[in-house]
Image: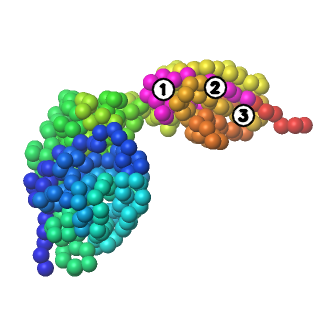
């Protein structure tokens, strides 16, 4: 029985290569639009000519997926594999350039790994990897010809493992050092990982800012285990608030740009910011702000029968309060006043209990919530989930009273 491992040099290549997204184009009928070249660039992702396999580390957001792109200039027998770390279970689908499903697999690689072995004609291909249970996952994806070294044990029974001694946090080779309280600025293509030490542990706030890049950040501990992740905490910027203190150790932040990998992203780690964490909850619409004047809330007035108001909204929730004079059915609508707007509504009572929310009602992108409300004060929040820039929205509130 032999044990094969991923070499440190190959690991460095895949970490750096995984940060270079495919230039904007339609691939696999749109399936691979957010994919990355398995070889780091198109020229090195032609497996017909590759001297050895090509591989990447896939960081899969909870409920998300990771797409590896490759081409063939001549027919070839390929082995396409995905092996998860920490007991995770990857599932893989292979599509051709026209978007047709070529093959799919869950556990043919053994130990929960996915493995597809097939003969393919020249063309463009997309290997889509996701977690079986939609949980966050770190996996290795390898594409090679049948004569190349496999990643998984497959049907041969040969034990093949990932070398867990090679981790992004283990060496400055794999990550730039970040000083607590001091921002680091670089594109995700330049610096896909930032490393920092936490000698005494502690509660932290981690931010990544540049809406042009649309950063996604994932925090790992020194063993390579997933700790937390975030995308779009405030608009398209990301933020992780860790109120529970982390243990002492070394940590790594993986940074991915979902839009422009060349745009500089400002990454900062500091002490936990309770005030900022609350504001994020208000701006995201997850929590209603207090009505004590400490946070801006627009008073729409008393809802007798019908109220209408126009507003400019963006990716951060704008809050309104209104009074209901007596029991009735209340309907709130948010109607996009320009093409491309996509408003989202959420309704709370004055104690901060969420009553209902809605994104798209009917066949359009407009939103509507309805609830039977007693006399009292209520809040609703509206944000646009399609645009970080302000867009116009028309708000309408109606109250219907029971027939006597």
**Cα–Cα gap, marks 1 and 3:** 24 Å
Quadrant of the rendered structure where residue 319 is? top right
Q: Main secondary structure of the magenta part?
A: strand
Q: Return the residue at label 3.
A: 330
Classify residue 311 as left or right of residue 133: right
Q: Residues within 10 Å of mark 2 (few under 14, many from 20)?
A: some
User: In the image, is residue 220 above or below residue 208?
Assistant: below
Q: Secondary structure at mark 2?
A: strand
Q: Which residue is painted at 77% across and 25% down in the image?
A: 305
Left/right of residue 308 with respect to residue 346 in the rendered view: right
Q: Quadrant of residue 398?
A: top right
- State whether residue 364 is above or below residue 61: above
Q: What residue range appears in magenta? A: 380-398
Q: Nearer the viewer, residue 89 or 99?
A: 99
Secondary structure of residue under mark 1: loop
The answer to which of marks 2 and 3 sits earlier in the sequence is: 3
For label 1, the crowd category at 10 Å Cα-Cα, with few meaning under 14, some 14 to 19 and many 20 or more, is many
Q: Residue at x 27, y 36 (%)?
A: 261
Mark 2 and mark 1 lie on one chain; the one further toward the N terminus is 1
Contact, CB < 8 Å: mark 2 with mark 1? no
* Left or right of residue 2, residue 124 in this image: right
Q: Earlier in the sequence, mark 1 or mark 3?
A: 1
Q: Nearer the viewer, residue 171 or 227?
A: 171
Circle 3 packing at 10 Å, graded few (<14), some (14-19), many (20+), is many
Residue behind mark 1: 314
The answer to if 356 sits in the magenta stretch is no
Q: Where residue 346 appears, x then y in whole percent?
A: 58, 36
User: Mark 2 or mark 3, which is nearer to you?
Assistant: 2
Measuring from the top left, give residue 361's x and y in whole percent: 63, 40
Query: Residue 23, how many percent across, how many down?
Result: 29, 39
Residue that carries the numbered disc 2 in the rendered image: 395
């Amino acid at each position: 029985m032999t044990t094969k491992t991923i070499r440190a040099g190959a690991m460095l290549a895949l970490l750096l290569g995984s940060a270079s997204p495919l230039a904007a184009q339609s691939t696999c009928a749109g399936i691979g639009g957010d994919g990355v070249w398995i070889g780091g660039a198109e020229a090195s992702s032609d497996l017909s000519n590759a001297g050895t396999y090509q591989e990447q580390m896939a960081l899969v957001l909870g409920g998300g997926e990771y797409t590896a792109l490759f081409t063939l200039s001549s027919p070839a027998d390929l082995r396409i594999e995905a092996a998860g770390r920490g007991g995770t279970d990857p599932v893989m689908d292979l599509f051709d350039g026209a978007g047709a499903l070529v093959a799919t697999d869950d556990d043919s690689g053994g130990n929960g790994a996915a493995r597809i072995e097939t003969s393919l004609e020249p063309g463009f291909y997309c290997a889509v990897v996701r977690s079986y249970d939609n949980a966050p996952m770190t996996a290795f994806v390898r594409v090679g010809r049948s004569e190349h070294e496999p990643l998984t044990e497959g049907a041969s029974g040969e034990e093949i493992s990932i070398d867990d001694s090679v981790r992004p946090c283990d060496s400055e080779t794999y990550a730039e050092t970040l000083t607590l309280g001091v921002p680091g600025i670089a594109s995700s293509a330049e610096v896909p990982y930032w490393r920092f030490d936490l000698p005494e542990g502690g509660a932290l706030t981690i931010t990544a800012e540049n809406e042009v890049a649309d950063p996604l950040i994932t925090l790992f501990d020194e063993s390579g285990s997933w700790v937390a992740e975030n995308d779009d905490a405030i608009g398209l910027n990301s933020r992780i608030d860790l109120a529970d203190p982390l243990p002492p150790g070394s940590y790594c932040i993986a940074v991915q740009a979902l839009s422009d990998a060349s745009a500089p992203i400002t990454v900062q780690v500091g002490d936990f910011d309770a005030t900022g964490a609350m504001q994020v909850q208000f701006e995201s619409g997850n929590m209603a702000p207090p009505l004590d004047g400490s946070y801006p809330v627009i008073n729409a007035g008393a809802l007798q029968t019908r109220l209408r108001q126009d507003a400019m909204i963006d990716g951060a929730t704008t809050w309104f309060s209104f009074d209901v004079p007596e029991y009735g059915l209340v309907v709130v609508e948010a109607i996009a006043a320009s093409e491309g707007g996509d408003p989202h509504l959420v309704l709370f009572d004055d104690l901060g209990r969420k009553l209902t929310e809605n994104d798209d009602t009917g066949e359009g992108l407009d939103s509507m919530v309805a609830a039977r409300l007693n006399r009292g004060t209520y809040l609703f929040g509206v944000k646009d989930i399609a645009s970080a820039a302000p867009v116009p929205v028309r708000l309408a509130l109606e109250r219907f009273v029971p027939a006597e």
